[in-house]
Amino acid sequence: MTAYAYDAWYPLAWSRDIGPRLATRRVLEEDLVVWRNAQGQVAALEDVCPHRLAPLSLGTLKEDAVECGYHGLRFDCSGQCVAAPGMQRPPAGAAVRSYPTAESMGMVWVWMGEPARADRSQVFHLPEYDDPNYSVVEGDALPVQANYLNLADNLCDPTHVVYVHKSTLASAGREETRVMHERQGNKVVTWRWVIDGPLIPVFQGLKDFGGNVDRWHYYHYHAPSIAVIDFGSARTGTGAPEGNREDCIQMYACHFITPVDQRSCVQHWLCLKNSPADPEVDERLRDNLRLAFNEDKAVLEAIQRNEDKPRDWKRIHLSLDASSIKMRRIVEEMAAAPAR
């Protein structure tokens, strides 16, 4: 069973999906009731009333507090009971757990550890998100019926692309391209270059290079559940591997993973590109990325089904697994770290 790292900011939901109404989310096997209060801040409480254990999400919002739909106890954004029917004051100690939240990059983030240890300055944010030279293509919240670390394996691994994403992200004949990797604190970076190859399908129509390109893939995995893939192309021989990217296509595919439980997760994804927003181009890109991520989903869910079967087998490892092994070791270290 996967051990969870609780002292971390996890993606909870797209900001666009949380408003002044009750919503539910499940993170690290914990059920939360979520809403946006009158001040525009997101409240997240344990989804259970301490009276008869009815889910608070079955209730209603009343004056910025959630009213239990079973007996009417009300809990404010901090989780404190502020009213109880038939009582002048709430019962002593009546409260539910409140989870710190923050917003960044169009996402609501939640801190699953001890609230006193939550540091909002550490919420993930990519500088290019605010750069006027980039435009944002916001994607979906893709449910994946697989353990989130299996998805993390996928997002530390450029080598699967040529086999899984032939119609979107791959170019043929590049199976043996060398892959590099290193650990940087609680991050694993995996990268490779494809020199003098054709433009990948998902880049078609974005820019005409008039021939082959030099293409890069840098996979930045921030444990436990954030992946940013910096990928792009420049005309072959113009110095991109040495750092000259003045005339290129560059994208950042951001994957914010919510671990739901041992066998399911949600993949929130968006893309940043170094070209202006264009509704037609952006929708085509969104459709292509949906296709690619659903290709991953099909493989990962099949893997999970095999993992769930009772059988006597042992995994083998290949040299291409080095990044995934590093990533899982970091998550294990984070999960085992004593509370500060």
Image (cartoon, grey):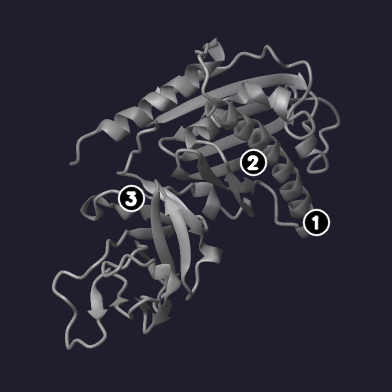
Instruction: Give the percent coordinates (x, y) of residue 154.
Output: 57, 29
Q: Is residue 205 left or right of residue 86?
A: right
Is 316 above or below relative to 278? above
Asked if marks 1 and 2 touch (Cβ < 8 Å), the reply is: no
Write the residue at 72% across / 23% down.
163
Tell me the kind of residue under disc 2: Met
Q: Which residue is mark 1?
A: 280
Q: Nearer the viewer, residue 133 or 120?
A: 120
Q: Nearer the viewer, residue 292 or 1?
A: 1
Write the residue at 74% across / 53% down.
282
Q: Nearer the viewer, mark 3 or mark 2?
A: 3
Query: Callout 1 environment at 10 Å: few (<14), some (14 to 19), or many (20+)?
Result: few
Write the residue at 61% across / 13% down.
178
Residue sitting at the far right: 210
Tell me the kind of residue under disc 3: Met
Q: Secondary structure at mark 1?
A: helix
Query: Callout 3 environment at 10 Å: few (<14), some (14 to 19), or many (20+)?
Result: many
Residue sitting at the far left: 92
